Amino acid sequence: MRISLLASAALLLASGASAQEWCTPRRADSGYVALTGLTVWDGSGAPARPRTTVLLHGERIAGVFPDGVQALPSGTAVHQLTGKFAIPGLIDSHVHVGSDVSGEDSRVRADRRLCRALLGGITAVRDMAGDTRALGSMQRDAKVGDIASPDIYFASLWAGPAFFADPRTAQASAGEVPGSMPGMRSIDSTTDLRQAVAEARGTGATAIKLYAALSPALVAAATAEAHRQGLEVWAHAAMAAVTPLQMTSGGVDVISHAALIARQLGPEAYGALVKDSTGSVRGRFDTPTFDSLFAEMRRRGTILDATLFIYTMDDRQKLAPMAAEITRRAHRLGVALVAGTDSLGSGDEGAWQLPNLHEELRLLVQEGGLSSADALAGATRNAAAAVGALDRRGTIEPGKLADLIILDADPVADIRNTTRIRLVVKRGAVYPGGPSLHP
C-alpha cells in the first residue's frame, strides 16, 4: 500500500520530531489522499458537516462529500480521522515579515519565522508593507514549496513625500533612495499614477497600500487607477487629512486598525477620547456618525482589519476598549471583518509558540462580540477576499488549494480550540502542528 505524506507525518509525530526538523519543505502527495471521518467546517457559511471525506489530489481539493457515498480513485491513500475537525487554513491579514530582510542571516530568520507560523496553522499572510524585493523572493519560494511557509500576499507602499524621512523607509529601500522604488513610492498630485501602478504590479504585489501624507482626492485617484489595473487597495482607517468615511468613499478595499475609526469624530474629539483612558466607551459609537460610516462600508464591501491583538501591547493598551467597542458596533451593523495581528509572533528561535492570530481570534469573540464562526470567517473566507484570492482559498471546496487544518476539538464550540492543531495541510503538503510541537 502506498505511504502518503500524511502517514509520513504521523510517523514523525510519533517519533517526537522538533519544530525545527519540520521546517524542511515538503511537497504534496502526487496521488489521491482521502481524509475521512472528519467534521468539516468549510468556511462557506454552511454549518459544520460530520462524517465527511475531504479528497486531496496534489495541491488541490478534489472533493468534499459524506463518508462512503463516492467511490475513491484507485490507489487512494485513506486516513481515518474520526473525532477530528477540519477548517480552512488560517490567514493572518496583517503582518510585516518583509520589513527588514537584508543579508543572508536575516532571510534565514525570516524563513524560520514563517515556518513557525505555518506550523501554527497559518497557510497565508497579508504583508502590509516591507521590502518588496525580499517579499517577492519569499513569495515565490513559499508558493513553489522551496521553503515551509504560508503563501505571501504583499503591498507596494505609497505615501506623500513627507513620509519618506521615516527611518523605516530606509530599511525597506536599502540600496536605493526611499520613495523612488516601485515597492516603496512617494506620490503627489504630479505622479503618473498609471505608470506607478504598472511598476507596482511588476514587483509581484497584490495591492497598493496607501499610508500617510495623502489627500482625499489623491486617495480616490490612486485607488481608481489601482483597481483599473487589477490591484487591491489597502490603507489605515484614517490619515491626518483623510477620515475613515473619505477612505471608504475613495474606494479602499480594506482599512486597518479599529481604533482609528474613531478619527471620524475629528482631531479634537478623537484626541480627547484617547486622552481619557479611564472613561467608559460602551455605546460611545452607537451614533448616526458611525452608523452612516458603517452603512457605507457595508454597501461598498469595505473590509475592516481590526487588529485587536496589537492593542494588547505597550502603550496602545489604553486604546483596547475603544478598538473592541468599534469592532463590536461595526460587526453588528454588517461590516465584514478580517483577523490580523500586526505582529505575526512565534519568533525565529527558542521554544516554539503559537502565532498571535489565535489570540486575535479569541479577542474578536470575547471582546469584539463575534461568534466563533464569524471570527473563523475573518481568518478564512473574508481574509481570502481581502487579498483577492477567494477563488483559490479561504474555504474547503473542490478545486481550491488544499489548505486546511486538522484540529482535535471543535473551534465553533470554543474559538480557543483553534490552538489544538493536529496537522496542517498547505497546498497539499502535510506538517504537524499544535500540541505535538510544544517543548
Image (tube, grey):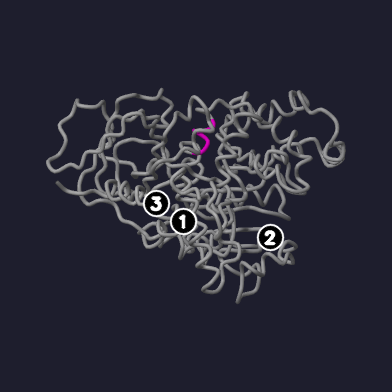
The amino acid on which the numbered mark 1 sits, given as a three-letter code, is: Cys
Q: Could you tell whether 433 is left or right of 209 in the image?
A: left
Identify the residue at the far bottom of this view: 175
- The residue singled out by tag 2 in the image is 188
Magenta stretch: dominant secondary structure: helix
Above or below residue 362? Residue 233 is below
- Residue 33: % across, % down: 24, 42
Residue 39 lies in the magenta-colored region: no
The residue shown at (46%, 36%) is: 381
Residue 377 lies in the magenta-colored region: yes
- The residue singled out by tag 1 in the image is 115
Of labels 1 and 2, earlier in sequence is: 1
Q: Could you tell whether 205 is left or right of 174 in the image?
A: left
Question: Answer yes or no: do the residues labelled 1 and 2 have beta carbons within 8 Å?
Answer: no
Secondary structure type for disc 1: helix
Secondary structure type for disc 2: loop
Q: Nearer the viewer, residue 388 or 320?
A: 320
- Residue 220: % across, % down: 63, 47
- The residue singled out by tag 3 in the image is 16
Q: Which residues are magenta?
A: 375-379
Of labels 3 and 1, earlier in sequence is: 3
Between the C-alphas of marks 3 and 1, the distance is 18 Å
